[in-house]
Amino acid sequence: MSFLKAFIKFVPVFVLAALMIMGWDALIAAPLATIAAVIIANLTEKLKFNDCLKAAMDSVGNILVALFILMFAYAMASAFMTTGVGASVVNLALSVGVTARTTAVIGLFVTGILSVATGTSWGTFAACAPIFLWLIHIVDPNCAETGSLLLTTCAIAGGACFGDNIGLISDTTIVSSGIQGVEVVDRVRTQGVWSVSCLILAGVCFFIAATVMGLPNTAADTSGVLDAIPQSGLDYLAVERPEAIDLLNQVESGVSYIMIIPLILVIAFAIIGFNTFACIGTGILSAYILGIFAGTTSFTAAGITEYLELCMDGFADAGSWVVVMMMWVAAFGGIMGKMHAFEPLSKLIVMVSRNVKQLMTCNGLLCLIGNAVLSDEMAQIVTVGPITKNIVEENLEGTEEAMYSIKLRNATFSDAMGVFGSQLIPWHVYLAFYVGIAVNVYPLFEFKNTHFIMYNFMAMIAVASMLILTLTGADRFVPLFRMAREPEIQLKKNIQKEEAAA
């Protein structure tokens, strides 16, 4: 009977997962799953509607700060895409000179840096796919046959996710940190070396793969890369990702390299330890000031108004879908938590875990499995995040500093397994979006979801290394990335055993 009750409590999760897999928008799937959760909570725990409503509101209240950060992040992303910060990064890379053998590597690093600057993997891929898919076509006309097309495609797909996992203005970074109760800047600081190491190692893998595949190593003129993009591709982006058009126009016309400075300031302030709002605010303000000298903004009443409206549009873009969706999914998670729906799962993880490393590795696997089931990284973060947080708070005991390091790892797990994990799940909504962009901007090849997995070394390395480093304790060899472990923090069940034995 208890098993049946536990199974019934999971019905709302099945509802959410089924609707997401069927392709329903999260703004529809989450409310329907929340309604299902209210019904199940009443049937299994006799919870009244007001009880469920309070649980939902309390859960939403826990991420309010993250929602405000998210709105500012969208404003900064809009500013960076419009003032030339993103374009300056791309132009700097293209000026180096590329060959078929190095296009994937350069694409990886350009999208990695651009994703940090914009905070969006989707926007980064939309902006860079037209550039690099046609760039590889120019330097290697037989790219579809030689394999360089798919190698480059996987490189920019993986690189685009880099900033979504460590960027100060990334919605997934902000929300995963908010749910676990840690500062975004602490996330960036502690996982920085690990993240950059994954990026560099992926770059090495892409270069080795390109060399083994025997790709041409002759430099080609890249000045006409934008002219090679068909109008149909540009028309598609104008509707689906208009900010990508702004960036492409700036890449074509050129923009001063001083526009890289706002990105450098944001990253530097984050490393120093400034408050998240201060870092984002610095980015927005410096982009406007330097844009005056670069000619992308103007110091006039009309120019100031236009820039403020741009930031306002960023707030609106966040609120029109992401913020609302997050509130619904958070409400869903609150109700599920109120009826203790995840308690059997938590008990199973605690039961099989003999130490802190094993428990945290199970948390990471739980995030990855949740991402595969829900087919949406944000849905996974706000649904599974509270579960892993509860597992830690109820089953670990240690100093405040040690517990904070555990929460940081939970947040990184939630984000990394969501963003990078999505690149390894064929039915994930992430890959569906990437396929849509790729097919429309490069119609000479029929892209499939699995193509984005074949050479996605960035995602493979990030997911595998985090799980292995956590399980083995080798994370202690990565600067700032060490997670607390025994004896500074212990499983409560082990403490109880020791006390009983004594």
Image (cartoon, helix red, strand yellow):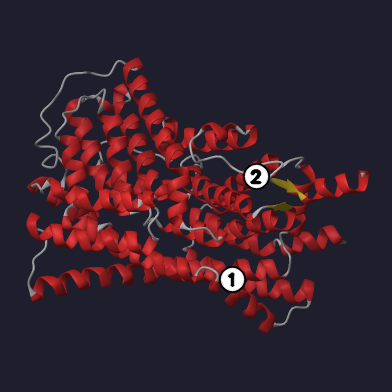
Residue nearest the viewer, comparing 428 with 270: 270
Q: Is residue 456 visible?
A: no
- Residue at x 46%, y 37% (from the top left corner): 194
Q: As drawn, is 196 to the left or to the right of 123?
A: right
For numbered disc 2, what is the local secondary structure?
helix
Spatial separation of the CA atoms under disc 2 and disc 1? 23 Å
Is residue 120 depicted above or below 316 in this figure? above
2 vs 1, front mark: 2
Q: Quick check: can you spot residue 346?
A: yes
Q: Residues within 10 Å of mark 2 (few under 14, many from 20)?
A: many
Q: Is residue 247 left or right of residue 484?
A: left
The residue tagged 2 is: 360
**Quick one: SS at disc 1?**
helix
Locate residue 245 relative to residue 460 in the image: left or right.
left
> Which image quarter is the N terminus in?
bottom right
User: Which image quarter: residue 15?
Assistant: bottom right
- Residue 29 in picture, x, y percent from top left: 53, 66
Image spot of residue 279 (x, y percent)? 33, 59
Report the quarter where the C terminus lies: top right
Which kind of residue does numbered mark 2 sit on?
A: Met
Residue for point 60% across, 45% down:
364
Q: Nearer the viewer, residue 490 or 438?
A: 490
